[in-house]
Image: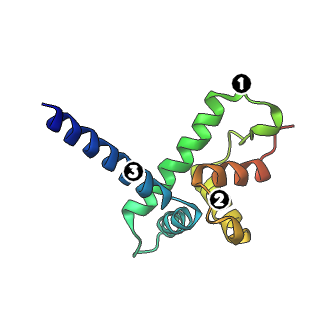
Amino acid sequence: MKAGLLTITLAVLFSSAAAIAEQAKYDGNELLGQCQQYVKAADKEKIYDQFDAASCGGFVQGVTGTVFFYSELLKNDDKFCVPDSATNGQVVRIVVKYLRDNPKLLNENRVTLVWLALQDAYPCK
């Protein structure tokens, strides 16, 4: 009984460590590659990675939606204010430009990078 419980516990720990290691690869480098695929799709290029394009679009939209949802709880300096007229495509292009202009930050977490890009482009007044 104890051996079985120990085996299960070790399996959970190892799978958790693997999940953390897997998440670590999702930094700005990964995000830039995915978002470049989104831009290719938006520009109607014939060859692009559909999975990466969708991953970028969904991720960026997720960050903007989360900040909007929690905007009442955030200090003005911590949030961004994307205009209602901005499309997801425009927002992704802003993220791509920010990532290209700040290569030293590409090792950072992708949530942070999207947030910084949008704070830079759309500060709240």
Q: Which sits earlier in the primary sequence, circle 1 or circle 2?
A: 1
Left or right: residue 14 compared with residue 53: left
Question: Badge 2 local density, few (<14 within 10 Å), some, or many (20+)?
Answer: many
Asked if one can make out residue 54 in the rendered structure from this viewpoint, the answer is no
Real-space CA distance between mark 1 and mark 3, rounded to the nearest whole angstrom: 32 Å
Q: Nearer the viewer, residue 83 or 8?
A: 8
Furthest residue in direction front, as rendered: 2
Would you name the residue on which mark 3 appears? 17
Residue shown at 46% from the left, 74% from the top: 45
Q: Nearer the viewer, residue 103 or 67?
A: 103
Real-space CA distance between mark 3 and mark 2, rounded to the nearest whole angstrom: 29 Å
Disc 3 marks a residue whose amino acid type is Ala
- Judged from the image, the secondary structure of the residue bearing numbered disc 3 is helix
Estimate the x, y position of residue 49 in percent, counting from the top left. 39, 68
Would you name the residue on which mark 1 appears? 73
Q: Nearer the viewer, mark 1 or mark 3?
A: 3
Would you name the residue on which mark 2 appears? 95
Asked if one can make out residue 96 in the rendered structure from this viewpoint, the answer is yes
Disc 1 marks a residue whose amino acid type is Leu
Is disc 1 in contact with disc 3, using a CB cutoff of under 8 Å?
no
Estimate the x, y position of residue 98 in percent, counting from the top left. 71, 63
Disc 2 marks a residue whose amino acid type is Val
